[in-house]
Amino acid sequence: MTKNVKSRINTRPFDAANYLGSEEEIAKYLELVLEDNDSTLLAAALGDIARARGMTQLAKDTGLSRESLYRSLSGERVPSGDTLLRVIHALGFRLGIQPQTTRSS
């Protein structure tokens, strides 16, 4: 007689922060996110980058509390423009503007 043994597989939720190891990967990630024109998605992506680099340092660099950053960059709400710009600057990025290749009416 064989026993019916179930093996247990331990998994954890996907976290993009675990896969953002280089500046090139981070920049490409942000480029892809910006294509969606979704500010909550942008906030969540900045949160992923902040966790990959260290939220404590980002809090020091922005002058915002860690708790405020976690809430603002959760992707569950749209942070203020000021917060987004402070985070982008503190992470060492700058925004650029270029015309769209096709104009939507």
Image (cartoon, grey):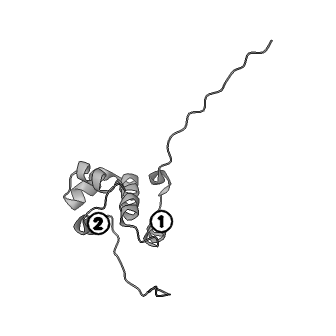
As drawn, the label of residue 29 is 1
| Residue located at (35% from left, 54% from top) | 76
Q: Secondary structure at mark 1?
A: helix
| Residue located at (46% from left, 73% from top) | 35
As drawn, the label of residue 84 is 2
Left or right for 71, reference 9: left
**Residue 11 is drawn in which quadrant?**
top right
| Residue located at (41% from left, 72% from top) | 37
Q: Secondary structure at mark 2?
A: helix
- Asked if disc 1 and disc 2 are in contact, CB closer than 8 Å, the reply is no
102 or 8, nearer to the observer: 102
Does residue 66 sit above or below 83 in this rendering?
above
- Residue 17 percent location from the top left of the image: 44, 53
Amino acid residing under circle 1: Tyr
- Residue 49 percent location from the top left of the image: 39, 58
| Residue located at (41% from left, 85% from top) | 98
- Residue 38 percent location from the top left of the image: 40, 67
Q: Residue furthest left?
A: 63
Does residue 72 sit above or below 7 in this rendering?
below
**Residue 61 is drawn in which quadrant?**
bottom left
